[in-house]
Structure formats: C-alpha cells, structure tokens
Image: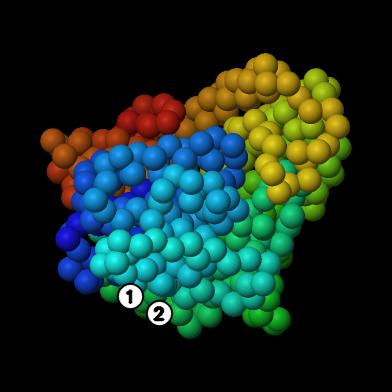
Amino acid sequence: MKVSYCSLGCKVNEYEAVAVINKFIDAGFTLVPFHEPADVCIINTCTVTSTSDAKSRKMIRRAQRRNRNGVVAVMGCFSQLHPEEVKETGADIIIGTSNRQLLFDLCLKALEEKKGQVLVEDMKQGREYEEIKVERYQSQTRGYIKIEDGCDNFCSYCEIPYARGRVRSRKAEEIVNEIKQLTALGMKELVLTGINTGAYGKDLGDFGFADLLKEILKVENLGRIRISSLEVTQLTEELLRIFSENKERFCPHFHVPLQNGDDEILKLMNRKYNTEEYFKKIQEIRKVFPEANITTDYMVGFPGETTEHFERGREFVRKVGFGEMHVFPFSPRPHARAKDFPNQVDGITKRFRVNEMLNLNQEMALAYREKFVGRTVEVLVEEAEHGIAFGHSENYLEVSFPANARSNELVRVEIVKADYPVSIGKEKA
C-alpha cells in the first residue's frame, strides 16, 4: 500500500508529519509524492494566517480529488481550531494537535471499515507533552529535534496558544536519546525546534533551556547545532555564556522574532520587550558571534499602525541590520484579540508596507552576504547533481557551487559572488 503527505507551515509541523509517516513506512507502506494517488494521504495543516488557512483548505481538497478511493487524514493547527470546516470537506480522519500517536491505527481502521472519525481535543486541558519521535529522515542532511510544544505568550494577533495549548516540555532524556540516534546515522547538523523553543523547561521547575543545552553538549561526535528560533526575552546571560564557551558547536545564526519596530505597536501586540531591549540583546549576541546572521519576522499593518509608526519601525530595522527578514501583513485571526481592535489598516496600505519592507530586506540581505565575498564558509550539502552542489553554511547562507560533493557532506567553500537568496561559491582546496 502507498502513503503520501503534505506538511504546511513550521518546522515543528514537518517534524510531526515525518514522525507519523515513519510509522506507515515501518508497517510496509511505500511513501509516494503528494501528487500521486495513495491509500492513505495525510495533510498537516497550519493556521498562523488567513493565507495558511486557505492553503490548508486547498491541500485538503486536492487530496480528496486525487485519493477518491483512499483515506484522507487531516491533522495540525487548522483542523484543531476548525474541525467542522474540515469535516465539510469530506476528510475521513480529523485530529488536531494531539492524538498523533493514534493516527496510524485510525487510518488502518478507516481503510478496513470505510468509516471516518473526528478526534479533536480541547488543548486548554493538555498539560503533558505528547511523545512522538523521528528516528530517521528520508533525506539525511539536517535533523530537526522537537523539544517542546505550546506557547504561553498570547500575543494579541496570534491564535497558536489556542491551537497548541500551553508550554509542555519534552523529557530531556528523550531529546538526548533522539540526538544520539540521529548523530549515529551521520547527521552533520541538528536543529532544535518547538512552538516556543526557548520556553523549554518553563513547566519543569528548575530545569530550563540552558540546562538542556548542557546535556546535549555531552553527546559524543555531535555535529553543529542550530536553534530554530529564540524570543529576545529568552536570551539570558547564562544562555549567552553557553554560546560563548561552545562557539564551535553552535551555528552563528539566530532567528529572533521582532514582529514590529515601534514600541507603541509592540505594546498593543502584547510583546514582552521594547526596541531598546531588543537592540541591546542583539548587540550581546554579536559580542559572542561578531558576524552572526540575525534573522527575524516582521508584521506590517497591525491595527493602529500609522505612517509614523511604520517609518519608525523601518528605521529601527535598518539600525539592527538583519541578514534576512520574513515580512507579512497583519491577518485577523478568529481566536485572537487584535481582530476586534480599532483602527484596522486597509489592504492597499498593508500591501504597500509589505513591499517597502521587502525592498529593505533585499538591501540588508545583500549587504550581509557581501561581507563574506572572498571568505570561506562551511556548507552542508543538501542537493548535488550534474556537478553543482547546493546547501547552507553555518550562518545560514544559501550557497551554490561547482563540486562533485555528495548530499550530507560538509564542504569548505569560498564565496565568490554575493547574491540573495543564493550566493555563488567555489570549493576551497
């Protein structure tokens, strides 16, 4: 029998989808591309924006058309918050952001009995981390390790805490064991990820994210470690000290969500910092890693954002000097407070501001990459064919270079031409 899947949204979603799919492969299913007919098709959905909702609906409908005789199973944040809407699509199995360990059995039962099931639980009640693990990847280059689930921030524009529940940390022993297993398989880079990665340990009392890193650093033959995302409030002195003492282990790339560069808007967003605090922490990172690639998320068009707010925000972004910025417009979410805020910004203005920030992103990204022309970086090869290799450096530069390298090799590469998103290099002898 055949199984296919489509995972939308964040790296946590991809991790969870791979964990579920591996169960099918272990049982003898053949993994086929999403566009091919399959006996079981799984869609892991996202609901972070209205665009994410639309993509989730589109993929569910596409799966229904291509798998008329198979089982279509839907999981993730969109189905967690909108199970009735998913049910109307005719999906056979609907779960949310829990019960993923049951999905394999639910799909087998649906194949036999031709009968579907909806199993979506209220995430406000969830207090335990659901242990699902990835013991291998089909492509062995970069391994993602999920360390926690949930978020307690309740930013006024975001409904992820309602979809994912409160912070629930994975047992350190399980994390370390998974890292050992993936390291033994030869993975050269491991990415620590979660819904709110740096909040790890908030529910554990006296064992936090820094303590987890200390345990991970004890693993033998450990490759390089990348941290998917950290809130600026989570960049403690202890964490920065660990980075400083283990520079050779940690990738000098830090994704630190800013969301907006104006203090009044940050307060309305219920973010827990101001621009001065943010800038200070970024400077502290750069003391440890002077040429770190600092990337971020930035929202324009939040309710109440005037032209003056926007201009102040743009100047702050320029002051920080990001290596890359994910720019997106405010999107009213049904479960988030900001949908009811006054002074909603019109669509034309939001599109204009997105374009303005994207232009600034292009400028900053290119300026950051130009610093590395003539210098050598270490690229983890992700794809290689016809004598051309492609991968990411330790500071997350996308690099293409002529080489007879193989996937999962670490190659020293000299940057010869800076470009964005992909720079050009040559293999260093």
User: What number is the disc on residue 181?
Assistant: 1
Q: Is residue 337 above or below residue 80?
A: above
Relative to 362, say whether 414 is above or below.
below
Q: Which of the labelled discs sits on residue 177, or is there none?
A: 2
Q: Is the N terminus in the top left, top right, bottom left or bottom right quadrant? A: bottom left
- Specify the amino acid type for callout 1: Gln
The tally of labels here is 2
- Give the label on residue 412, or none: none
On screen, residue 368 above or below 155 = above
Q: Nearer the viewer, residue 39 or 24?
A: 39
Q: Is residue 411 left or right of residue 232?
A: left
Q: Residue at x 21, y 46 (%)?
A: 37
Q: Is residue 93 left or right of residue 366?
A: left
Q: Residue 369 at x, y = what percent?
A: 47, 33
Using the rendered view, name the quadrant where residue 422 is placed: top left
Give the residue drawn at x 83%, y 37%. Answer: 341
**Circle 2 — which element?**
helix
Mark 1 closeness class: few <14, some 14–19, many ≥20 residues within 10 Å: some
On the image, the x and y values in percent for residue 163 come to: 61, 57
Residue 362 image offset from top left, x and y in percent: 53, 25
The residue sitting at 23% across, 56% down in the picture is: 39
